Amino acid sequence: MTEQNLNPLVLLPESTAQLMEDMEEENSESINDLIYCHLYGVVGDWYLSKISEDREKAFGFKMINSEPVWEMDDWLTNCHEWGEVSIKNLQEIVNQKFLKEKDIRFLITRDLFWEPIKFSEINLDQNTLFYPGTTDRNFS
């Protein structure tokens, strides 16, 4: 395994991108889509199924749950939907806000042990990672 594949802060290594379907002009969501890459952080999860040729954009399901007190609206918008994901922007957030500024709110990492799975088989009931702050979450 290459060094890039072993670093969870490299959000979409080329070896993973090569497995993914190419993005088409019109992307449609399907519970039968294979999810090739799972990114997660304290603000949510990204399940990626398709990739652009230039590797800067992906298509998948986004579950972003930023609390208002975190003041993240300039970077990420809360949503639970299929859509385009800017891999380039997410990587810049990780590089600048998390690695450089050491701001835990911007920790986004790749699941190193993810295996391709149908979207319908993923449990979406809660985020993968929770912010260790004042967030009131119901874990039942």
Image (cartoon, rainbow, N blue to C red):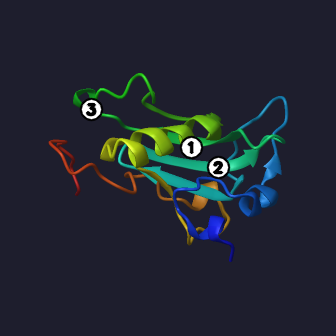
The kind of residue tagged 1 is Gln
Q: Which mark is residue 48?
A: 2
Q: Nearer the viewer, residue 17 or 82?
A: 17
Question: Mark 1 against mark 3, which lies toward the viewer?
Answer: 1
Q: Name, please, the residue furthest toward the front.
A: 100
Q: Which mark, residue 33?
A: none
Direction top: furthest residue: 74
Q: Which residue is mark 1?
A: 91
Vertical placement of 88 versus 16: above or below?
above
Name the residue tied to disc 3: 70
What secondary structure is marked by label 2? Answer: strand
**In the displayed structure, does residue 70 sit left or right of residue 62?**
left
Amino acid of disc 3: Trp
Callouts 2 and 1 close, C-beta under 8 Å: no
- Secondary structure type for disc 1: helix
Q: Is residue 57 visible?
A: yes
Q: Earlier in the sequence, mark 2 or mark 1?
A: 2
Q: Please tell me which of labels 2 and 3 falls first in the chain.
A: 2
The N terminus is located in which quarter?
Answer: bottom right
From the top left corner, tell me how far across and down residue 60 is, in percent. 64, 43
Q: Residue at x 38, y 51 (%)?
A: 127
Q: Badges 2 and 3: C-beta atoms under 8 Å apart? A: no
Q: Can residue 86 be seen by looking at this rendering?
A: no
User: Closer to the camera: disc 2 or disc 1?
Assistant: 1
| Alpha carbons under labels 2 and 1: distance apart | 14 Å
Kind of residue indicated by mark 2:
Leu
Callout 1 crowding tier (Cα within 10 Å): few <14, some 14–19, many ≥20:
some
Choose the circle earlier in sequence order: 1 or 3: 3
